[in-house]
């Protein structure tokens, strides 16, 4: 179980040793894609946890397990005190009003034959959240909150631009008054100017509706901007967790360090850090390296890293790092 | 530009429009620029800004009978837009090469990496299969593919995304082009792989001395590798200048907004991003005799009509905004004010 910084906000979501393996058939026989391999984390009510990592690191699979769009192979997901991994489908359905998801591709996740207003009304009708008139009024209000006046309510998804579709997806996710939103790459398909608008909208909605976010993205600068805490994933494992500022300015896992140094900086005079260019590619989640998952690409790897898998451990500064040799903090921070 | 020699590529008043059922759609609206020898030119803009179409049209790669291309594109003094298909085919691949965003679309799945490279070499030069194959191995080594002698026989699906992009780069470099056009070469890649590819492009540029036009939506990528930056909006150039000046003292309100839309990368955090309101202008918008950004600009006024022209305020650094030059930095400060979050 992960330890959180001292805080009086209750834990809303907790994942305990979540594992998700996908069996696949290969020429070598049946094998397992170890997409998520023992992840534990907690999210307090009202905070934003950012999950970041490269493609194939399992961040989306974990996100889907957190709202049980996928059934984890093992482990528990506890939402507001209830283990949602063992509940029946029927119970789950009513629990789902508490947690909703926003997807990356807003076109694929919207029904092309349903108008904007009907898209937002649908979850409320499914959960019989009031009379038709009440539902309509609430849907119109939600559309307005995400920036659409009434003239938009009769439009179909194809009549919206990418950013507008994403806002429509957000309105739909908010329809059931959820407490938790899991957003999977919500801005990565958008142009930068539109990306900023959607990020601002998400911040505004968070304070208006006191929402809790799990924000999944590959872009560390975006995650650092929106999240209070950041979890860094690599090959299905959480390798570092800490406050957004700490992780971004003083990473303690070698992978986080490399990930941050790979972000292109706008003004090269501000560039004081040393650029670490990782060699090689992400290993396959079917055939994971033994020991530390990062050891084949790590600059600091020693013999023990090739044999023993490091567990996520709490360091003295409140950071959690899965590394045998966590990086030391720069003197100014200590 | 301060060069004494003539530029490698000199694009003059390029216009690209498409005839559609609903009228003429203007994708590129009269842009002029030059690419110097050995220079890396960054072309930045959002989707629909015309950045890709402008370079595709110069290379004759737009295969659409309803496309109208006007203007001149002088490559080493010869107008690419006036060339016949055969003449252009001899230039493309040999003297000018292109790299696309998705490496899989540039590779045929049923042929090996080596086949792709040899085929390109043999299309432009009279060499034996053996010699072409050997050069393919050398090129794959040069772009950092380990064990190239063996990997030359691998098929595209056997490479990862980053490795595939390296194969495409090796293909592009196979005839030693003097100009390389890279259209979003790292957009489909993870950041750690992006860093590898950018480093590779820079290294190869230094080694082979080719000029590069880098098309991207990412200000960070452009600031990392280019010597000069051009910012496009609505098919026109909003701003163009040396990279450092554009990044540090951008002149056009669109560039201000574009840079303020990116979350800070220096470790500071802001409560809200100074986003640009509204959506990018549609290329089919008929009202074009104005500054196309004025609809989203906080400083728009009657002066934004008619279409302002690109003015060189500082040698080499031009922009197309009508705001008084002396007040720009103060206006920029006001436009992009943000509240820093103290944690």
Image (spheres, rainbow, N blue to C red):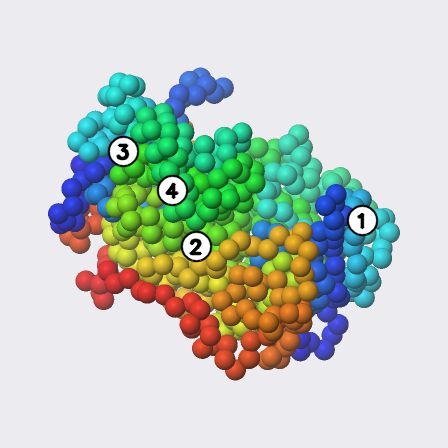
- Where in the figure is residue B1, as x and y percent of width and height? 67, 75
| Placement of B68 over or under B110, stated as above or below | below
Crowding at dot 1, Cα within 10 Å, few <14 / some 14-19 / many 20+, comes out as some
| Placement of B3 over or under A297, stated as above or below | below
Instruction: Measure how far apart labels 3 and 2 are at the Cα level.
Output: 27 Å
Q: Does residue B208 appear left or right of residue B226 in this picture? A: right
Instruction: Measure how far apart labels 4 and 3 are at the Cα level.
Output: 17 Å
- Where in the figure is residue A128, as x and y percent of width and height? 32, 26
Asked which quadrant contains residue B269, the reply is bottom left
Crowding at dot 4, Cα within 10 Å, few <14 / some 14-19 / many 20+, comes out as many
Subunit under mark 1: B
Asked which quadrant contains residue A64, the reply is top left
Residue under label 1: B89
User: Which element is circle 3 on?
Assistant: helix
Residue under label 3: A98
Residue under label 2: A196
In the displayed orientation, state which residue is furthest to the bottom: B326
- Where in the figure is residue B189, as x and y percent of width and height? 50, 45
Instruction: Measure how far apart labels 2 and 4 are at the Cα level.
Output: 20 Å
Instruction: Measure how far apart labels 4 and 1 are at the Cα level.
Output: 55 Å
State the residue in front, B148 or A287: A287
Residue under label 4: A142
Instruction: Measure how far apart labels 2 and 1 are at the Cα level.
Output: 42 Å
In the displayed orientation, state which residue is furthest to the front: A133
Instruction: Using the image, tell me which numbered label, if any, was put on residue A163.
Output: none
Say which of marks 2 and 4 sits in front.
4
Q: Does residue B26 appear left or right of residue B103 in this picture? A: right
Asked which quadrant contains residue A81, the reply is top left
């Amino acid at each position: 179980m992960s330890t959180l910084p001292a805080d009086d906000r209750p834990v809303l979501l907790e994942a305990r040793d979540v594992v998700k393996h996908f069996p696949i058939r290969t020429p070598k026989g049946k094998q397992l894609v170890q997409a998520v391999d023992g992840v534990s984390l907690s999210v307090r009510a009202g905070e934003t946890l950012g999950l970041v990592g490269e493609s194939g690191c399992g961040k989306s699979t974990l996100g889907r397990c957190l709202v049980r769009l996928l059934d984890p192979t093992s482990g528990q997901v506890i939402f507001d005190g209830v283990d949602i991994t063992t509940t029946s489908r029927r119970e789950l359905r009513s629990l789902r009003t508490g947690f909703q998801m926003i997807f990356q591709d807003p076109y694929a996740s919207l029904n092309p034959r349903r108008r904007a207003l009907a898209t937002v009304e649908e979850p409320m009708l499914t959960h019989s959240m009031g009379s038709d008139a009440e539902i309509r009024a609430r849907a119109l209000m939600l559309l307005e909150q995400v920036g659409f006046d009434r003239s938009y309510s009769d439009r179909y998804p194809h009549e919206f631009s990418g950013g507008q579709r994403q806002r429509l997806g957000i309105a739909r996710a908010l329809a059931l008054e959820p407490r938790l939103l899991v957003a999977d790459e919500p801005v990565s398909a958008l142009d930068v100017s539109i990306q900023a608008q959607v990020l601002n909208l998400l911040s505004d909605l968070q304070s208006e509706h006191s929402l809790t976010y799990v924000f999944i993205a590959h872009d560390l600068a975006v995650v650092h901007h929106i999240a209070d805490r950041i979890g860094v994933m690599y090959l299905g494992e959480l390798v570092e967790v800490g406050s957004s500022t700490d992780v971004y300015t003083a990473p303690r896992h070698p992978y986080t360090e490399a990930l941050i140094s790979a972000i292109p900086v706008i003004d090269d005079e501000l560039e004081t850090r040393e650029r670490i260019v990782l060699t090689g590619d992400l290993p396959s989640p079917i055939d994971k390296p033994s020991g530390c998952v990062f050891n084949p690409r790590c600059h600091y790897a020693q013999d023990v890293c090739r044999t023993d898998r490091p567990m996520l451990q709490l360091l003295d500064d409140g950071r959690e790092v899965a590394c045998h040799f966590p990086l030391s903090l720069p003197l100014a921070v200590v | 530009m301060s060069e004494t020699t003539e530029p490698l590529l000199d694009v003059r008043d390029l216009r690209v429009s498409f005839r559609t059922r609903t009228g003429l759609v203007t994708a590129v609206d009269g842009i002029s620029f030059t690419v110097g020898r050995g220079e890396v030119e960054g072309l930045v803009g959002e989707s629909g800004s015309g950045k890709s179409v402008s370079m595709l049209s110069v290379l004759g790669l737009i295969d659409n009978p309803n496309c109208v291309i006007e203007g001149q594109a002088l490559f080493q003094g010869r107008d690419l837009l006036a060339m016949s298909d055969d003449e252009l085919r001899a230039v493309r691949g040999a003297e000018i090469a292109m790299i696309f965003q998705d490496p899989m679309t540039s590779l045929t799945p049923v042929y090996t990496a080596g086949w792709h490279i040899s085929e390109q070499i043999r299309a432009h030069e009279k060499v034996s299969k053996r010699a072409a194959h050997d050069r393919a191995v050398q090129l794959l080594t040069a772009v950092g593919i380990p064990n190239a002698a063996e990997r030359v026989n691998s098929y595209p699906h056997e490479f990862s995304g980053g490795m595939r992009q390296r194969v495409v780069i090796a293909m592009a470099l196979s005839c030693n082009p003097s100009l390389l056009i890279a259209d979003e070469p790292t957009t489909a890649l993870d950041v750690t792989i992006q860093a590898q590819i950018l480093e590779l492009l820079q290294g190869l540029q230094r080694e082979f001395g080719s000029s590069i036009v880098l098309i991207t939506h990412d200000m960070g990528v452009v600031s990392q590798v280019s010597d000069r930056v051009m910012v496009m909006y609505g098919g026109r150039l909003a701003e163009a200048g040396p990279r450092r000046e554009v990044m540090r003292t951008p002149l056009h309100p669109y560039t201000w907004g574009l840079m303020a839309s990116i979350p800070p990368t220096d470790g500071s955090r802001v409560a809200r991003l100074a986003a640009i309101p509204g959506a990018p202008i549609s290329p089919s918008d008929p009202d074009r005799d104005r500054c196309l950004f004025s609809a989203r600009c906080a400083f728009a006024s009657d002066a934004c009509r008619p279409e302002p022209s690109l003015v060189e305020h500082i040698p080499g650094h031009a922009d197309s905004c009508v705001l008084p030059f002396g007040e720009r930095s103060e206006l920029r400060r006001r436009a992009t004010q943000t509240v820093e979050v103290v944690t």
